[in-house]
Amino acid sequence: TDTAPPTAPNPIAGATPTPPTQPQSPSPNQSLPSPPLQSPPPTSTANTTAPSPSTTPSTAKPYTPNPSIDPLLQENAHLLSHNAIITSENANLKDKIQKLKNLLGRSAKAQREAVTDLATTKTKLCDANSAIERLSARVEILENRPSHLELLADFETNFDRAVL
């Protein structure tokens, strides 16, 4: 009887297992490869019965990076970091746009207020000019009237004529 535990079948039919490679130190732009899977060491059993599948220790091979997938993972990590940068720039630009909109809104509001203030000031100026003209005409009328002394002198002259 054979007491060796059964091995797990190759997950991809017809594929040859890749030899384990030495881990490389990742560059700053690359993400770290996932850690290799470790399986517990096989234990020898002395009984001759077939072990049940639930009690059989698995003999999974440690993770070895696939050379054809590794560049794709690196590209994906690069794209994710680039996406994070773009997302943060987008958020910053949205904030700046909102601040500019607020500033423009306040500026437009101030412009509208300045226009209304100018219009009210113009109407007040027109009212003041018409009041000045009206009062100037009244002053002219009052200036052309004879004074009290003149009226008194005329009265005396007329009275003297009347008495004689």
Image (cartoon, rainbow, N blue to C red):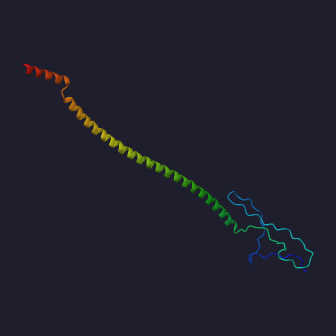
- Observer-nearest of 5 and 65: 5
- In screen coordinates, is 104 left or right of 90? left
Q: Which of the 4 image quarters holds residue 1? A: bottom right
The residue shown at (74%, 67%) is 65
Where in the figure is residue 56, as x and y percent of width and height? 84, 74
The residue shown at (11%, 22%) is 158
- Observer-nearest of 127 and 92: 127
Q: Which of the 4 image quarters holds residue 38? A: bottom right
- Observer-nearest of 120 and 145: 145
The residue shown at (64%, 59%) is 81
Note whether 39 is above or below 113 in the view shown: below
Where in the figure is residue 40, as x and y percent of width and height? 84, 68
Note whether 92 is above or below 20 in the view shown: above
Outermost residue, front direction? 163
- Observer-nearest of 88 and 144: 144
Where in the figure is residue 139, as x and y percent of width and height? 24, 32
The residue shown at (67%, 66%) is 72
Outermost residue, left direction? 164
Where in the figure is residue 141, as x and y percent of width and height? 20, 32
- In screen coordinates, is 144 left or right of 58? left
Outermost residue, right direction? 46
Q: Which of the 4 image quarters holds residue 164? A: top left
- In screen coordinates, is 140 left or right of 38? left
Note whether 114 is above or below 146 in the view shown: below
The number of callouts visible is 0
